Image: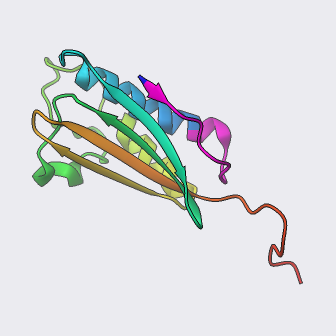
Amino acid sequence: MEHRRPAHRLGDPTLVRQALFNLVENAAKYSRGANPPRIRIWGQERATDVLYCVEDNGVGFDMNYASKLFQVFQRLHRQEDFEGTGIGLALTKRIIDRHGGTLEAKGAVGQGATFSFTLPKRQTGGNRGIA
């Protein structure tokens, strides 16, 4: 597993940590059959936001069903194949939405998946809009 510490961003640290944990937990779950399983977690500071990514080499998913991923109790894989309640990604979406960010998923069957989200950057110094 590879990890680099991301930049400062806005938001409740506990909720953002939960969102990231959900994505890492899913990556571990869906890549456990890969030999060897690989998970890459990284962040990138950009002009107005911070991008976070969790990439894996797991079972992936069909992009035709990507819109279902963030709905409560929607699953793209059978319960018998992968445990879970079907709320982790929906919760993650709510957390990121609540913080004014975006959440995206990309994948291909048998080729893994990448989940990424953005959060607005915390302003440091300078004019913060105070007149």
Give above or below for 37 relative to 106.
above
Apparent side of residue 118 relative to residue 23 in the rendered image (left or right) = right
Apparent side of residue 89 relative to residue 69 in the rendered image (left or right) = right
Magenta highlight: main SS: loop
Instruction: Reply yes or no: does residue 12 show up in magenta.
Output: yes
- Please state which of residues 106 and 19 is positioned toward the viewer in this rendering: 106
In percent of width and height, residue 47 lies at 58, 66
Residue at 38 percent across and 35 percent down: it is: 88
In percent of width and height, residue 55 lies at 33, 37
- Please state which of residues 12 and 109 is positioned toward the viewer in this rendering: 109
Instruction: Report the magenta residues as a range.
Output: 2-16
Residue at 84 percent across and 71 percent down: it is: 126
The quarter in which the N terminus is drawn is top left
Give above or below for 114 relative to 4.
below
- Please state which of residues 100 and 123 is positioned toward the viewer in this rendering: 123
In percent of width and height, residue 122 lies at 71, 58
Residue at 29 percent across and 21 percent down: it is: 29
Instruction: Reply yes or no: does residue 11 show up in magenta.
Output: yes
